[in-house]
Amino acid sequence: MLTRRSLARLAGAAVLAMSVAAPARAEPVVIKFSHVVAPDTPKGKGAAKFKELAEKYTEGAVKVEVYPNSQLYKDKEELEALQLGAVQMLAPSLAKFGPLGVQQFELFDLPYLMNGYDDLRKITDGPVGKDLLARLEPKGIKGLAYWDNGFKVMSANSPLHVPDDFLGLKMRIQSSKILEAEMQALGAVPQVLAFSEVYQALQTGVVDGTENPPSNMYTQKMHEVQKHATLSNHGYLGYAVIVNKAFWEGLDPAVRANLEKAMAEATDYANSIAKKENDDALAAMKAAGTTTFYELSDEERAEWVAALRPVHKEMAGRIGADLIKQAYDTLGITE
């Protein structure tokens, strides 16, 4: 008969055997996901959704740390940080790849190239979009997805109804030769500023106006310091979700497959809410009453298009005439 002492020894031996047989769980792989906008924007919510799904599908093998609002890096710093491996994932706006030497992404900055989301999907989901992401790989970057923000409005402290209204205005842009040419075509003076500095620059008069989708304008409270805005929808602001290529390819294939699944679902989510977020932001700013929003007439829109379409030819040498033609063919645009 087994005594209590014998039972205790057997139980202890069983526990010891189990602890030896079961290897200690490895520390989770950490993905630092840095971005420059607020958590309650489409990009911010998309990043949060990716974190949720990535940790769920990998069953804790991956931990995603999201750093919004330029907590880690500002616009000009984040791509270098990714290449150096200081962060693993970013979702920079598409214009950010120009200074990296992949200026073909500035195709998305061309004014009045796309007429709404149907046109956009033809680009991002088709050969043009896939080819652009592949161009990042020689830079040590893997492109995973395109995330929408939305189509942009122009804002300033004076009405912007026709191109001549821009004459002499200092307009904030992100770093992009296309956006620089766009503002110059309107007679404005482009000013490159980090996104995190825009509110103060508008408030203090360092710049007179800027361009943004409504969700960015609202979450950064720019409507508090801009008296006028025009619903021009002249350009698109979107993001490429990117990851350090060496880090991504070094992941266990099963883990990477689960992260790809999480990214696909987070992309569907982020893009599905982007238009609603912008519509809601626009409604909230109108209700606040601090900014007067103006809708272009057909005749006025034609003036804007006439003033801005020459930027396409002017920038063909930078983006690539063949790429622009491919986009035109995709969208059914005749020159």
Image (spheres, grey):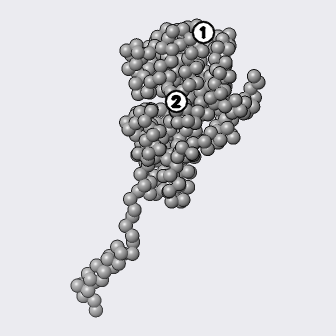
Q: Of the numbered discs in the image, which one, if any, rests on residue 192? A: none
Is 41 placed left or right of 184 in the picture? left
The part of the image, by quadrant, that contains residue 117 is top right
Tell me which amino acid carries mark 2: Glu
Residue 162, label in figure: 1
| Residue 296: image location, x then y, percent | 62, 13
| Place of residue 255 in the rendered image (x, y in percent of width and height, measured from the top left) | 51, 57
Residue 12 vs residue 211, the one in the foreground: 211
Taking depth in this image into account, of 139 and 205 the one nearest to the observer is 139
As helix, strand or loop, the secondary structure at mark 2 comes to: helix
N-terminal of the two: label 1 or label 2? 1
Identify residue for label 2. Answer: 277
Q: Residue at x 51, y 18 (%)?
A: 190
Q: Residue at x 58, y 19 (%)?
A: 182
**The residue under label 1 is which amino acid type?**
Val
Nearer the observer, 121 or 113: 113
Image quadrant where one finds the C terminus: top right
* Distance between the alpha carbons at the discs numbered 1 and 2: 27 Å
Nearer mark to the viewer, of 1 and 2: 1
Q: Secondary structure at mark 1?
A: loop
Residue 288 visible? The answer is no
